[in-house]
Image (cartoon, grey):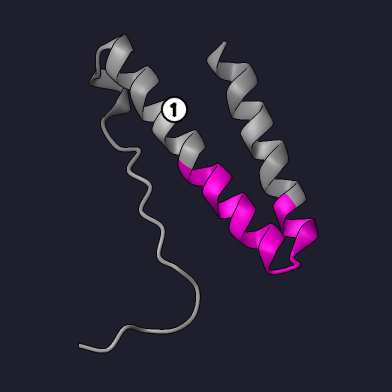
Amino acid sequence: MKRKRGRPRLYLAASGVEDMPVANTEERLLALLATLEECQAFLTDRANTETARLLSLAILELRMEGD
């Protein structure tokens, strides 16, 4: 099977977070932040700095809400 070219697919699962224990929710938040940071690095490497900057603001907001 050939690998498709283009943008990488992102899978962000957010459903059912309300019913999860706090520790599991925190783990999911950390995993989500790691994924977003990878996406930010990808965008920065591709010289899409404006979008990378917007994503960094979203990451910052999530980090502030998580504290």
Which residue type carries mark 1? Leu
Residue at image position (53%, 49%) is 38
Main SS, magenta residues: helix
Extreme residue toward the left, this view: 1
Above-or-below relation of 48 to 57: below
* Residue 28 left/right relative to 66: left
Q: How dense is the environment of label 1, judged by Cα within 10 Å: few (below 14), some, or many (20 and up)? A: some
| Nearest the eye: 14 or 26 | 26
User: Which quarter of the rendered picture does the C terminus lie within?
Assistant: top right
| Residue found at x 73% / y 48% | 54
| Percent of width and height locating residue 8 | 45, 68
From the viewer's perspective, tell me whether residue 56 is left or right of residue 28. right
Residue designated by label 1: 30
Residue 48 within the magenta-colored segment of the rendering: yes
Q: Where is residue 35 in the image (x, y as percent from the top left)?
A: 47, 44
38 shown above or below 61: below
Q: Quadrant of the N terminus?
A: bottom left
Label 1's element? Answer: helix
Residue pushed farthest front?
A: 45
Q: Does 28 sit left or right of 53 as displayed?
A: left
Instruction: Based on the picture, tell me whether residue 39 belongs to the magenta stretch.
Output: yes
**Which residues are the magenta region?**
35-52
Farthest residue, direction right: 50
Work out whether 37 lies above or below 59.
below
Give the residue at x 66% y 28%. Answer: 61
Q: Where residue 5 appears, x then y in whole percent?
A: 44, 84
Which residue corresponds to the image point at 70% horizontal and 41% vertical from the top-left?
56
Give the mark count: 1
The percent position of residue 52, horizontal first and vertical second, equals 71, 53
